[in-house]
Image (tube, rainbow, N blue to C red):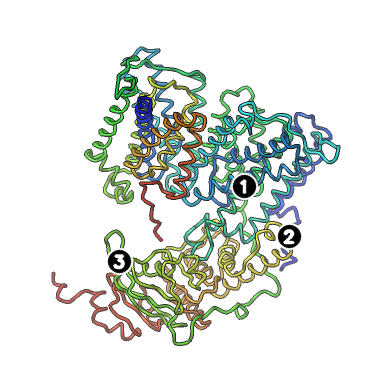
């Protein structure tokens, strides 16, 4: 099976993988030998494409992976360029040292920008980054002692080794190598725990947090990397151009950087390259329309957003994927079977409740949704939470999983007080959940979805992920294997390399459960898992739920299918208007007059 | 003392403008969660139209002001149709930010071809007369800006709370789906919001044209200043925006008076970033609750 699929990859007739390969070989050759026959003018252009490519890699991580748009990265580029130029011209430090100072400046400034704006998010972020870019330009014009004012800094030294000063060709090759390395780092990042979890945050922040992913931290990491590459690109530009001035780093540059990613295809490997090539070459081709350069950029941006929102590479990939179904991912020969899965934490001592709610109250703007609610959940049982629509069941789940904070009352997990903790910390306390309306990471494959869950207890160091050390690669394989095993455990038999968005409904439900149990919880909260499933699918769900219970997991189940609930539940708590009205075994609850009243109404009322 | 009074009054005048432009962001933000990032360029357009109509076509000032408001309002509708509607289903997507930015730079480039890079000044209907106030000499045209903006705000408030259009706006802001089901076309309501926001921009540009030298390149920095105001005040709080606009206007003038005009922008944006650190949704803005 394994040898078969690798062999297929090399045959030209099977063109699922080969077009990229077929294009990249001549492309690489051209890039490498072009200084031999191209004129200085073209080498200069290609060098600029390389510099843009380095910065775009960071922009791609930011826009494509984090979903964060910054229209102020020219400001970070300027920080790198100016700091590097300043230390070179004032103190005579060589390029190799000043470039590091430039990157440090860009990162410091970028952090100052990122920390408040990432928290505010969305529209605030875009607005502030624009303002940031403009302020940096303004500061550079005014702060003469540092920046030389509107005239800028000139006489910046070219990179050199000993007495050998780099000429155009050496600089060109240097940029090509650096660009290749940054692309490689980007690729590594995306195929590691870090990149995958970052994309998960972009796709669905709430779901990612429920799996213990720290959204802010990851987005900051994305911003950090983009600041590193912007500073690096800026410094290289300063030292090869020998001259910088504030107007180089204006808002047009920031917009160009965003355009490169949107046009090339955000989140793709080739997007930054293709975008850079087009955005650099375009003004050269449209020389006669120089006056309308901005308008042309704007027009292209609108056209791309309207007709190819996934950019050139993304659209190309979309067409290709439509023609062929995705290959199934390979599994190692000694893959993890369900029996070998690390056990679930059962938590607490036998007899002691795994979860206790004590007098919880929650209201939304005056509407009391949960009132003085208390109940205990015994370990390794299935505890159903039922009640009419609007009774407050989902709100209870949201409080247990840390998404809502109760106004008063306490929540204990295995005897430890966890009230007011964030969803991430709740996950660390062994609580996992699914959502009433499935929240999968739509743009990620089924397997990747579950891998995000696994990463909750399989940590990976940032640097080893970035440089793709053998250790991190081994770890990636382990995570994938575990993800497969969890999918097996819930009895998922559908495609695993397919985008989650394209799955049928029943499969989505199962994948979400697999993803939740992949965090190895002791307590699993299922919010209407059977809603919308066929009878056959409900039977399968029942098998899964029982299997999880046998593995030692405790399950809280919100569900409206009463026959299913009474078959699987050990205990049922009934809530109505936010209050507990009954609790007991399915038999006891079914005959409780209050429950019957809540569901069917009082007899006296019926005649009205 | 008299320089202080003078500074405060011209600060309030600038602040009024900022508030007016910034309310344009707020109007659309509350209705469908998007803003027109080309608002600054719309203000520029209002000012440039004003110049053409009063200086070249010799239209009376107030007729030209009205016309500028209406024309820019139409541009607001066009922007909504072209750059917002397709992307507004998911306000968290970045599509509409980029598309309205694109519209903005297109507008600016075309305006540059039409009006050139020079600065223009429009004659004020009250000329260069000065009035004395607490010992300070103040240009009447600057002072008059304040009651005019106040008048527009009153009209806007009446529109928002007394007309059925305003009712639709508020209903759409509250629950777009339900508004649609009540037979009100929410696309139309969103278009009204963008028209209003454009009108505010156009009037803002028209009102500033006799006081400050206006040029094609001013759109971006004005738009940004209004953004700063919206961030400090809170995008979803009209009251906050008016307060923040006035305060920032005064702060700006005082900084250039007592510190140095050179550091003005820097100080203002540092304040903005500091506020954002403490209150990410602005001083008066309500945090939006994410439903799980």
Of badges 3 and 1, nearer the viewer stands 1
Up-down: is A119 above or below A599? above
Q: Quadrant of residue A250?
A: top right
- Tell me the quadrant of the picture where the N terminus of chain A can be found: bottom right
Q: CA distance from mark 3 to mark 2?
A: 58 Å
Q: Which residue is mark 3?
A: A369
Query: Could you confirm whether marks 2 and 1 are on the same chain?
Result: yes
Q: Earlier in the sequence, mark 3 or mark 2?
A: 2
Query: SS for tag 1?
Result: helix
Residue A520 as seen in the image, left or right of residue A464? left
Q: Which residue is mark 2?
A: A8
Where does the image place residue B194, in percent across and percent down from the top left?
A: 37, 36
| Nearer-the-camera pick, A136 or A334 | A136
Q: Residue at x 42, y 22 (%)?
A: B212
Where does the image place residue B171, in percent across and percent down from the top left?
A: 28, 47
Q: CA distance from mark 2 to mark 1?
A: 44 Å
Query: Could you confirm whether marks 3 and 1 are on the same chain?
Result: yes
Where does the image place residue A161, in percent across and percent down from the top left?
A: 83, 41
Q: Residue at x 40, y 73 (%)?
A: A411
Q: Which mark is residue A107?
A: 1
Of badges 2 and 1, nearer the viewer stands 1
């Amino acid at each position: 099976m394994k040898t078969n699929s690798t062999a297929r990859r090399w045959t030209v007739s099977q063109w699922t993988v080969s077009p990229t390969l077929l294009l990249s070989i001549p492309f690489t050759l051209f890039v490498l030998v072009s200084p031999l026959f191209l004129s200085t003018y073209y080498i200069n252009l290609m060098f600029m494409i390389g510099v843009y490519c380095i910065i775009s890699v960071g922009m791609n991580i930011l826009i494509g992976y984090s979903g964060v748009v910054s229209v102020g990265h020219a400001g970070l580029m300027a920080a790198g360029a100016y700091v590097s130029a300043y230390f070179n011209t004032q103190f005579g430090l060589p390029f190799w040292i000043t470039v590091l100072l430039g990157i440090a400046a860009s990162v410091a400034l970028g952090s100052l920008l990122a920390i408040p704006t990432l928290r505010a998010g969305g529209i605030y972020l875009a607005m502030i980054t624009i303002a940031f870019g403009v302020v940096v330009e303004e500061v550079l014009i005014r702060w003469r002692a540092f920046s030389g004012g509107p005239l800028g800094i000139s006489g910046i030294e070219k990179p050199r080794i000993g007495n050998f000063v780099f000429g155009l060709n050496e600089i060109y090759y240097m940029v090509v190598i650096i660009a290749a390395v940054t692309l490689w780092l980007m690729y590594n990042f995306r195929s590691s725990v870090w990149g995958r979890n970052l994309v998960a945050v972009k796709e669905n922040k709430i779901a990612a947090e429920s799996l213990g992913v720290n959204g802010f931290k990851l987005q900051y990491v994305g911003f950090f990397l983009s600041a590193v590459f912007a500073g690096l690109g800026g410094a290289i530009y300063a030292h090869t151009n020998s001259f910088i001035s504030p107007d180089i780093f204006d808002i047009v540059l920031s917009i160009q950087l965003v355009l490169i990613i949107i046009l090339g295809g955000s989140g793709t490997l080739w997007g930054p390259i293709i975008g850079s090539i087009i955005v650099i070459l375009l003004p050269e081709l449209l020389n006669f329309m120089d006056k309308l350069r901005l308008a042309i950029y704007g027009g292209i941006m609108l056209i791309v957003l309207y007709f190819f929102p996934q950019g050139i590479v993304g659209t190309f990939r979309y067409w290709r994927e439509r023609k062929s179904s995705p290959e199934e991912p390979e599994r190692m020969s000694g893959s993890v079977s369900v029996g070998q899965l690390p056990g679930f934490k059962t938590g607490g001592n036998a007899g002691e409740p795994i979860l206790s709610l004590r007098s919880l109250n929650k209201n939304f703007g005056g509407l009391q949704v949960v009132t003085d609610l208390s109940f205990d959940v015994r370990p390794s049982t299935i505890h159903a939470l039922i009640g009419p629509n609007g009774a407050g069941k989902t709100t209870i789940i949201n409080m247990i999983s840390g998404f809502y904070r109760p106004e008063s009352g306490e929540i204990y997990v295995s005897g430890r007080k966890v009230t007011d903790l964030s969803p991430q910390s709740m996950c660390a306390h062994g609580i996992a959940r699914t959502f009433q309306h499935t929240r999968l990471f739509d743009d990620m494959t089924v397997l990747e979805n579950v891998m995000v869950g696994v990463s909750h207890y399989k940590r990976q160091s940032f640097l080893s992920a970035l440089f793709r050390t053998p250790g991190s690669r081994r770890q990636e394989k382990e995570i994938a294997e575990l993800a497969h095993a969890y999918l097996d455990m819930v009895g998922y038999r559908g495609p695993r390399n397919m985008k989650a968005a394209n799955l049928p409904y029943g499969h989505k439900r199962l994948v979400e459960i697999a993803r939740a149990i992949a965090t190895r919880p002791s307590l699993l909260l299922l919010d209407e898992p059977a809603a919308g499933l066929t009878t056959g699918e409900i039977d399968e769900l029942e098998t899964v739920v029982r299997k999880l219970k046998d593995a030692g997991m405790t399950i809280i189940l919100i569900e409206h299918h009463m026959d299913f609930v009474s078959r699987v539940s050990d205990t049922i708590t009934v809530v109505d208007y936010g209050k507990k009205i009954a609790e007991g075994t399915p038999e006891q609850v079914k005959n409780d007059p209050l429950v019957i009243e809540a569901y069917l109404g009082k007899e006296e009322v019926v005649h009205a | 003392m008299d320089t202080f009074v003078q500074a405060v009054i011209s600060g309030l005048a600038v602040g009024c403008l900022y508030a007016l432009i910034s309310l344009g962001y707020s109007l659309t933000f509350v209705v469908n969660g998007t803003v027109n990032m080309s608002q600054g360029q719309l203000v520029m357009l209002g000012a440039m139209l004003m110049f053409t109509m009063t200086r070249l076509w010799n239209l009376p000032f107030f007729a030209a002001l009205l016309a500028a408001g209406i024309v820019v309002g139409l541009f607001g509708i066009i922007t909504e149709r072209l750059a917002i509607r397709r992307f507004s289903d998911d306000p968290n997507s970045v599509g509409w930010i980029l598309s309205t930015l694109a519209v903005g730079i297109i507008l600016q480039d075309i305006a540059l071809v039409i009006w050139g890079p020079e600065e223009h000044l429009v004659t004020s209907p009250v000329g260069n007369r000065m009035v004395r106030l607490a010992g300070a000499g103040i240009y009447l045209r600057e002072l008059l800006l304040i009651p005019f903006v106040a008048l527009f705000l009153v009209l806007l408030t009446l529109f928002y709370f007394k007309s059925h259009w305003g009712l639709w706006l508020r209903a759409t802001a509250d629950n777009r789906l339900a508004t649609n089901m009540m037979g009100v076309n929410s696309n139309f309501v969103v278009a009204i919001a963008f028209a209003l926001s454009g009108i505010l921009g156009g009037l803002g540009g028209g009102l500033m044209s006799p006081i400050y030298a206006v040029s094609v390149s001013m759109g971006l920095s004005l738009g940004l200043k209004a953004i700063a105001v919206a961030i400090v005040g809170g995008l979803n709080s009209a009251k906050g925006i008016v307060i923040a606009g006035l305060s920032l206007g005064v702060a700006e003038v005082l900084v250039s008076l007592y510190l140095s005009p050179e550091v003005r922008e820097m100080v203002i944006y540092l304040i903005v970033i500091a506020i954002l650190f403490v209150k990410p949704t602005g001083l008066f803005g309500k945090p939006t609750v994410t439903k799980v």
